[in-house]
């Protein structure tokens, strides 16, 4: 189940950051795009860890993608704009997702005290 969730999260993530047009949303409040970036990168980190992808591979690749995706958007996607603050939101999402993932794994491994 975690592997399927990871694959779905990766697909949504890649579509969200590399599609030629920015996804339009009826949700419009200040910094809603930053929240979307936080969610996209956090979900990949969380589900990847839960699926058993080694953190030493997963986290650096996702972190590199946070920067690379903004460079690609700036230079090669004409209807997108690269924003350094999006990379900050991406890395924050990665940190939150990794923290939640490590926490869930650790909690799952703890023996029952009852």
Image (spheres, grey):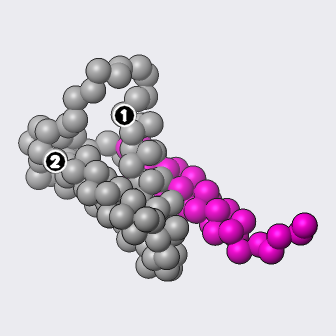
Q: Which residue corresponds to mark 1?
A: 33
Q: Which residues are magenta?
A: 85-114
**Number of numbered discs present?**
2
Residue 85: which disc? none
**Above-or-below relation of 79 to 96:** above
Of labels 1 and 2, earlier in sequence is: 2
Quadrant containing the N terminus is bottom left
73 in magenta: no
Which quarter of the image is occupied by the C terminus? bottom right
In percent of the image, x 39 and y 49: which residue is there?
40
With 17 as the anchor, is 2 left or right in this view? right
Q: Main secondary structure of the magenta part?
A: helix
Say if the magenta span includes residue 93: yes
Residue shown at the point (45%, 45%) measured from the top left = 38
**Identity of the residue drawn at 31% across and 57% down:** 8
Residue 77 in view, yes or no: yes
Farthest-out residue, right: 114
């Amino acid at each position: 189940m975690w592997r399927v969730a990871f694959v779905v999260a990766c697909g949504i993530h890649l579509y969200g950051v590399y599609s030629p047009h920015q996804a339009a949303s009826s949700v419009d409040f200040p910094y809603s795009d930053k929240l979307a970036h936080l969610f996209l990168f956090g979900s990949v980190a969380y589900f990847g860890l839960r699926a058993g992808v080694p953190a030493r591979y997963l986290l650096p690749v996702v972190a590199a993608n946070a920067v690379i995706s903004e460079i690609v958007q700036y230079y090669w996607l004409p209807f997108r704009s690269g924003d350094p603050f999006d990379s900050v939101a991406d890395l924050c999402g990665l940190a939150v997702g990794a923290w939640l993932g490590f926490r869930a794994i650790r909690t799952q491994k703890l023996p029952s005290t009852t």
